[in-house]
Amino acid sequence: MTSHPVRSIAAIAVVATLVATSCGGSEKADPVPQVSKTTVAAENRPPTTLTFWSSFGDTDTVAAFKPIIDRCQADNPWLTIDYVAKDDLQAAVSAATESGDVPDLIQGDFSSGLAALQAGKIVLPLDEFADRDGLDWSDFTPGAEKLVEFDGKHWGLPLSVDTAALFYNQDALDEVGINSPPTTFEELTTAANKLIKRKPDGTIERIGWVPDVGDGSFVMASGLLFGGSTFSDDGKKVTLTKNDAWKRSFIWQKAFYDALQPQDRLTRFFDSLGSYDSSENFFITGQVPLYLEASYFVTWPKRFGAGKPERWGVTPMPGPDGVADAAKFSIIASGNFFMIPTKATDPEASWVAAKCMATASREIADFQIVNGNIPANVDALDAFEQAEVAVTPAFKTFIDLARSPNAVVPSNGVIVNALTDEVTQLALDFRKGKIEESKLDQALADLESRLQDDLDTELGGQ
Amino acid sequence: MTDAGDPPERTAARRVAARKRRLTVLLLLSPWLIGFFVFTLYPIVNSMYWSFTVKRYGVPARWVGLKNYEQLLGNDDLGKALKNTVYLAVFGLPIRIGISLLAASMLARPRRGNGAYRLLFYVPSVVPAVASGALFFFLLKGGGPVASLFHLFGAESPVWFADPAWAKPALIMVGTWALGDAMLIFLAGLVDIPRSLYEAADLDGAGRWSKFRHVTLPMISPVTFFVLLTGLIGVLQSFDQAYVFSQGVRKGRLTGEPDGSLLTYAMLQLRQFQDGRIGLASAMAWVLFLLTFAITMVLLASRRRWVHAASEGSG
């Protein structure tokens, strides 16, 4: 019997596909490496080169980071740290995990991705290393420590934290008879309404304060401002209706937009705002005199504004009780930290490098002076404060917020991005009147139920 | 085939030769076959399998049956994204095809400077989609050159990106600007029409419109069909410009509509990939494929009604 080439090819195709699929389908999670009970003495270590993936890519930042690496290599002569900048670090780490070709150490902002990293067994919990070597977590600010915690474990060593504070234009406040920046929700509302400036035809020239300039980027933080949460500590429950914080925050946000109606005027105002990182920035031009932003923005007036606005400052946002007090409340929205991939070739060496780089206080302070973020290490923060506040007093508020013993951080869950999108959308719909206030409770409950179902599917039997 | 009268050794030799031929064919085909199996068939089959699982980076896939598809159908985002995509197809494609055909018709006639014009029309289509998206974002954003032009005439420019009603027309504009590839295909189709047909129409006293309606359109109908089909598939999978617009919008803090004024289906899919939800993203990919397949089938079925058979055969 003569077999046909097409049939042969088809047969090969089927077999190859089945083999390939079965290879993909039968993949097994690698076992988590055991942490050695004792630390290996430096003199007994063989020369080791670690591949270190970092999210810092631009030349100035990399150059500023280099002394941290140099310090750790000098302290550990057996260690060579091979720095590799990755544009999209999370995607690179995910792909590397799937292919098995992982780096030895990573550094970046994974603050909203801890649950996914844990679920994928992508990085190692560091508690065993830390306990064994007597790492004192109080060497880091309380908020920074919370940021790397999930499900009762520490997944990283913090490098920096991102806090947000209210930037105010004192000249604009003076213009409407307000002598000092708002420190309560009431004062913020009063200032926001007084600062609104319109042309005779109703066109908005200046707004006072809005939670975000229309893109919903403040929705999640505003939930935290009112004491809301998204996931339970173990990331297994969606907790949007745990209290009425989300509802109250939605109503609070909406009032600011209502004061700026009609919507088409507001939309046109937002559309007219110039490029963010330029002299046309809306805070520099005075179009938005009250603005919530992270510490890096401190450099903006000098960098882009050529001295404008002339008189400005930074003050903490009011917390859940409606009063601003950095000691009582701050939000650590995100941060940078070092993590050790589960499949790192030498996790012990990675730990030594991570620990060294996260605690090289002098070098970290110098690095953050260039980078504009707030150090997570307490000693580095002290050094940063001494060096920077005299030059740029506005940093003081951010340093106080970073030190807050009552800092809150966003909670973690494997569907955090989907949840963020859905909650943001709900808030925007509410702002625009698409959902009535009387139906907000039900809308939040429905959303929670849908997201919980989604989360249960993702987690399965975990 | 073997002859019944052939001696056994001759039959065996023929079999050996036939096997050698088959092996040679397989060997020659193997570079392509390996590429096909590894880079096309395997990912297709694997994504089909993953669409029925919860799959995250680094962990084995877990079978969940139709759960991903149920989740997709129960999510408003899918409907919004599809509505936007249909809008782009219904309004954007006819405009693109119409202008491409018009441009090709003008450039098909031998005239001085035609080459330069053809080049000018074609150049935008070699500009990467991301770059053209960024360019149009710069042109259309509030306070940009287009808004300034409106102001010059005392009018207010549309709010292109912050208003969902204008975001999709902006996307259509970018798509229409880069019409060089469609124009080039039409141009080839127009040049291919036998002059004798126009001469015969002239003898019958046909005017310009009649010639276009009764000669040009039927003769280029296979080309139109091709442009329509590829354009439709392109729209269904459109991603880059919408992505650039929405990134610009978000970075530019301009819009109150991240809900899908711009989001296309592919963008939703990307979000799932970024979230590491590979199972859900795979299910989305299959829904998109089935949708594309169904529309393609409908178009193919409609071909007999409006695609001119003779020109199709000759072309």
Image: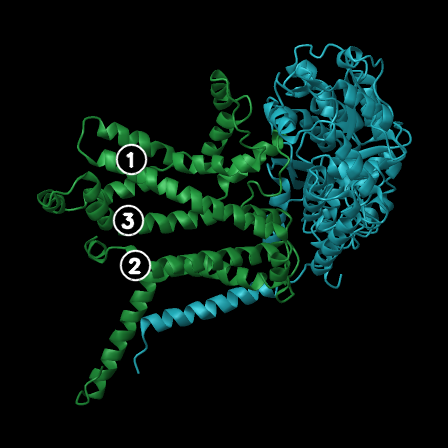
Q: Quadrant of residue A377?
A: top right
Q: Is residue A161 visible?
A: no
Q: CA distance from mark 3 to mark 2?
A: 15 Å
Residue B254 is tagged as none
- Residue ID at (24%, 37%): B105
Q: Report the residue marked by disc 1.
A: B103
- Residue ID at (47%, 19%): B149
Q: Is residue B299 above or below residue A436?
A: below
Q: Report the residue marked by disc 3.
A: B223
Which SS class for mark 2?
Answer: helix
Q: Is residue B227 left or right of residue B38?
A: left
Pointer 2 indicates a residue of which chain? B
Pointer 1 indicates a residue of which chain? B
The color chain A is rendered in: cyan
Classify 10 Å Cα crowding around label 2: few (below 14), some (14-19), many (20 and above): few
Classify 10 Å Cα crowding around label 1: few (below 14), some (14-19), many (20 and above): many
Amino acid type of the residue that numbered disc 3 sits on in the rendered structure: Val
Which chain has been coloured green in this picture?
B
Q: Report the residue marked by disc 2.
A: B305
Mark 2 or mark 1: whose residue is earlier in sequence? 1
Amino acid type of the residue that numbered disc 1 sits on in the rendered structure: Ala
- Residue ID at (87%, 35%): A320
x and y percentages locating residue A389 in the rendered image? 81, 17
User: Disc 3 or disc 2, which is closer to the eye?
Assistant: 2
Pointer 3 indicates a residue of which chain? B
Which SS class for mark 3?
Answer: helix
Q: Is residue A183 above or below residue B219?
A: above
Mark 1 or mark 3: whose residue is earlier in sequence? 1
Q: CA distance from mark 1 to mark 3?
A: 15 Å
User: Which image quadrant: the N terminus of chain A?
Assistant: bottom left
